[in-house]
Amino acid sequence: MIEIIPYKKQYRSDFYKLNIEWLQTYFYVEPYDEEVLSKPETYILNKGGHIFFIKNDERILGTFALMPTANPACFELTKMAVLPAYRGQKIGQQLLQFAIDFAKRQSYESLMLYSNTKLENAIYLYRKYGFKELPVEPNAPYKRGNIKMELIL
């Protein structure tokens, strides 16, 4: 049975491993990534953010996080990753839909994300769900992020 569950400390290494694998496959691990992924409680949860996992029985298949931004009504959709064997099976769509529904229940006004245009499938998916492109600010947190998108909820 596939279900989406909130963060539990027992899944901390899954959060780290999923994201490190994804970054190494498509890009590289930046120091900021290593820091956040090593300490999700400090950088995400303790700041009012959320981490979720999608699992099948006891196997974690994917994850994502919602991190607070300077605007309390806008959260950053980040750290989304799916196990390689499960990519292309709509796991990312399930996570994205869950993130949007969760954000609406929390009365957030918007979700934003940074990505890279190299990830054509991801960009297509974000656009399909209504995300619109915004200018990337010069001091963006990720060097690899060459596209910024927002979904008004």
Image: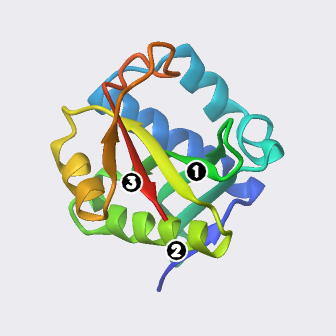
Q: Name the residue tied to disc 3.
A: 82
Horizontal arrangement in the rendering, residue 139 relative to residue 9 (left or right): left
> Secondary structure beneath disc 1?
strand
Query: Residue at 55% of width from left, 25% of height from top?
Result: 33
* Residue, disc 2: 101
Asked if marks 1 and 3 touch (Cβ < 8 Å), the reply is no
Residue 65: x %, y % from top left: 58, 50
- Residue 92 at x, y percent in the picture: 35, 61
Q: Say which label, 1 or 3, has the lower sequence index.
A: 1
Identify the residue at horizontal 65%, vertical 30% (top origin).
36
Q: Which residue is mark 1?
A: 65
Judge from the rendering whether residue 76 lies leftward or rightward of residue 73; answer left or right. Answer: left
Residue in the picture at 18% in, 50% down: 121
- Residue 117: x %, y % from top left: 21, 33
Disc 1 to disc 2, how far (Cα)? 14 Å
Relative to 77, residue 40 above or below: above
Residue drawn 33% across the image and 67% down it: 93
- The alpha-carbon separation of the residues under discs 1 and 3 comes to 13 Å
